[in-house]
């Protein structure tokens, strides 16, 4: 029997109601994503960019301060004021070989004239430069990026004042730091974090990475907001007319600008798969699987909060904080993969940091410590030895007639001699001894818990072993000798941290005097200078 028109209309209404019950959640999901989720994704993208810039800011500022510290350490070397011009130039050339981040290192005397320039003439008047005025006022200095008149390369200047023993201003040490090294650092950090940022001058000119696409110019929204110190939030159009999410951070007290932008289409495309959920089964999610989704959300909440908290610690510069515990075995596979990827990223960032720190403390040619390691670790070893009531000694070693090796056989032969000498000493010294290349063919050994007699015995063993050492180079066998100056000190009553640094400098000075005495009396000798505990600086 055929249905009546009224019954047919009722069936159509029931069908319409069923379709409405099915499609309304889908429409609601799409509307929610369009109105709310897109804004949430923009905020999330902005937070991600901000986190990347903060990490980049920490790396750039830390790296720049390390270069300033390198110059400060060199400015504290008492030999700056005593070495003749040729030896001062050779010393700076050695530092440049060990520190590829620097284009040039020069000493400027108190009258503002350069000395010891390894790449140019001395006597250039720089008394009108900002870094000279800052040093004369007793301040460290970091300049904006400039183009070097000597090398034609882009660099920025770091400087530190030089003072004599009475604290009087005697000039400054100036170093030109290559922006190429800064670009390499930023590229390394971006490879480890999958972030993408550029470093700009305040004017918007690109500094690093050098292979990035251009910079910013007045009229660009992001640069105008940064210059006005306005917050960068929401979506705007960049210089190419594209809708982007972007943000910025200032570095080094507003000298440089870190900026990052991401296309709005890329932000939404990454999360576009979310639309598949309301399109495929929004009704089931809301009506049937709601409780199951709630339990799933709870299982995701705890591990993601742990990762978020750890990421916040990393963002604040605490790279040594331990990773959170592994999620439980029944956690979703995506959470386990996310946890594994996060741990791998943290390990790679820590490895990159460790490699940078170790490289800054190691001589590239010989593999032993450099002067920076001697002055960073030496005071701690010296302090511990003297506080324990035990003596401490220092050896200064200089290869005899080393220049003749370079002149007669070439610098490659000289490098082989230095490497062989360093390898020999590593086998003769104790694990507790601190061995460092002090500069050129000059080395230093800090021997805690060793008095004058033990220091002289050690120096004599080294001298005899070097005398027997043979270095094969290009079918020839090179032999050489070493002159050694030793100085030792019994502990004073109390030693504070600054006192340990002063004592180490005094010991190195006494050992250097003994070294010159050994060279002046025929070379291939050991000379010792005692240092009474009452003469040691105690602060």
Image (cartoon, helix red, strand yellow):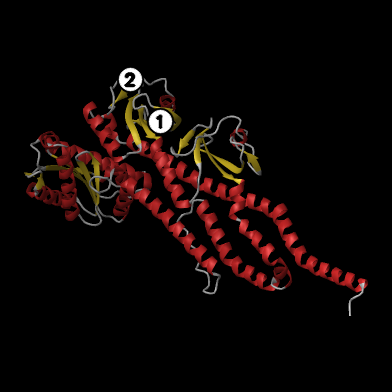
Q: Nearer the viewer, residue 170 or 4?
A: 4
Mark whose residue sits in front, 1 or 2: 1
Q: Which residue is mark 2?
A: 124
- Please name the residue shown 61% across and 33% down the image: 224
Picture quarter with the N terminus: bottom right
- Please name the residue shown 42% across and 47% down the image: 188
As helix, strand or loop, the secondary structure at mark 1 comes to strand
Q: Residue 385: image x %, image y %?
A: 29, 54
Is residue 72 visible to the viewer in this orientation of the structure? yes
- Please name the residue shown 34% across and 45% down the image: 360
Is residue 324 visible to the viewer in this orientation of the structure? no
**Alpha carbon of mark 1 to alpha carbon of mark 2: how far?**
20 Å
**Figure check: 350 above or below 503:** below
Q: Nearer the viewer, residue 276 or 173?
A: 276
The answer to which quarter of the image holds residue 151 is top left
- Please name the residue shown 8% across and 48% down the image: 470
The answer to which quarter of the image holds residue 507 is top left
**Figure check: 124 above or below 211:** above
Q: Is residue 215 left or right of residue 265?
A: left
Q: Nearer the viewer, residue 203 or 61?
A: 203
Q: Residues within 10 Å of mark 2 (few under 14, many from 20)?
A: few
**Figure check: 139 above or below 449:** above
Q: Give the mark, 1 or 2, whose residue is nearer the N terminus.
A: 2
As helix, strand or loop, the secondary structure at mark 2 comes to loop
Q: Is residue 522 left or right of residue 32?
A: left
Q: Residue 284: image x %, image y %?
A: 71, 70
Q: Residue 369: image x %, image y %?
A: 27, 48
Q: Which residue is mark 1?
A: 154
Q: Residues within 10 Å of mark 1 (few under 14, many from 20)?
A: some
């Amino acid at each position: 029997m055929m249905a009546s028109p009224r019954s047919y209309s009722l069936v159509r209404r029931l069908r319409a109601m069923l379709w409405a019950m099915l499609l309304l959640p889908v429409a609601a999901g799409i509307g929610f994503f369009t109105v709310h989720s897109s804004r949430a994704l923009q905020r999330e993208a902005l937070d991600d960019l901000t986190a990347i810039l903060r990490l980049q800011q920490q790396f750039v500022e830390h790296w720049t301060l390390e270069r300033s510290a390198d110059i400060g350490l060199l400015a504290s070397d008492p030999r700056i004021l005593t070495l003749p011009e040729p030896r001062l130039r050779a010393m700076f050339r050695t530092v440049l070989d060990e520190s590829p981040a620097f284009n040039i290192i020069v000493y400027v005397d108190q009258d503002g004239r350069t000395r010891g320039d390894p790449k140019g003439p001395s006597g250039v008047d720089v008394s009108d430069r900002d870094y000279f005025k800052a040093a004369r006022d007793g301040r460290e200095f970091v300049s904006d990026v400039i183009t070097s008149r000597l090398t034609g390369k882009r660099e920025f200047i770091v400087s530190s004042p030089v003072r004599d023993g009475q604290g009087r201003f005697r000039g400054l040490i100036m170093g030109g730091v290559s922006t190429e090294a800064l670009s390499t650092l930023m590229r390394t950090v971006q490879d480890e974090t999958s972030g993408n940022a550029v470093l700009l001058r305040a004017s918007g000119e690109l500094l690093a990475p050098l292979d990035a696409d251009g910079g910013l110019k007045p009229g660009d929204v992001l640069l105008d907001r940064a210059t006005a110190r306005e917050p960068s939030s929401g979506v705007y159009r960049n210089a190419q007319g594209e809708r982007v999410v972007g943000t910025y951070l200032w570095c080094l007290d507003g000298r440089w600008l870190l900026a990052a932008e991401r296309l709005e289409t890329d932000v939404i495309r990454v999360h576009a798969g979310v639309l598949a959920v309301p399109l495929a089964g929004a009704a089931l999610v809301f009506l049937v699987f709601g409780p199951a989704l709630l339990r799933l959300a709870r299982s995701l909440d705890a591990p993601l909060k742990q990762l978020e908290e750890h990421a916040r610690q990393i963002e604040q510069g605490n790279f040594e904080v331990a990773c959170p515990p592994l999620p439980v075995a029944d956690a979703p596979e995506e959470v386990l993969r996310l946890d594994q990827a996060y741990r791998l990223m943290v390990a790679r960032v820590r490895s990159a940091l460790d490699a940078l720190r170790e490289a800054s403390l190691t001589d590239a040619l010989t593999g032993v410590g450099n002067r920076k390691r001697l002055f960073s670790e030496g005071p701690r070893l010296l302090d511990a030895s003297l506080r324990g009531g035990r003596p401490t000694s220092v050896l200064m070693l200089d290869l005899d007639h080393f220049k003749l090796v370079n002149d007669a056989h070439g610098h490659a032969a000289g490098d082989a001699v230095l490497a062989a000498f360093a390898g020999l000493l590593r086998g003769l010294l104790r694990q507790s001894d601190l061995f460092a290349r002090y500069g050129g063919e000059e080395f230093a050994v800090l021997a805690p818990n060793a008095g004058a007699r033990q220091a002289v015995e050690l120096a004599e063993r080294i001298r005899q072993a070097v005398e027997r050492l043979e270095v094969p180079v290009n079918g020839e066998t090179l032999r050489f000798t070493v002159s050694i100056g030793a100085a030792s000190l019994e502990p004073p009553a109390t030693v504070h941290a600054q006192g340990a640094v002063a004592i180490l400098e005094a010991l190195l000075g006494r050992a250097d005097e003994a070294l010159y005495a050994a060279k002046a009396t025929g070379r291939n000798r050991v000379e010792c200078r005692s240092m009474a505990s009452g003469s040691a600086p105690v602060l």
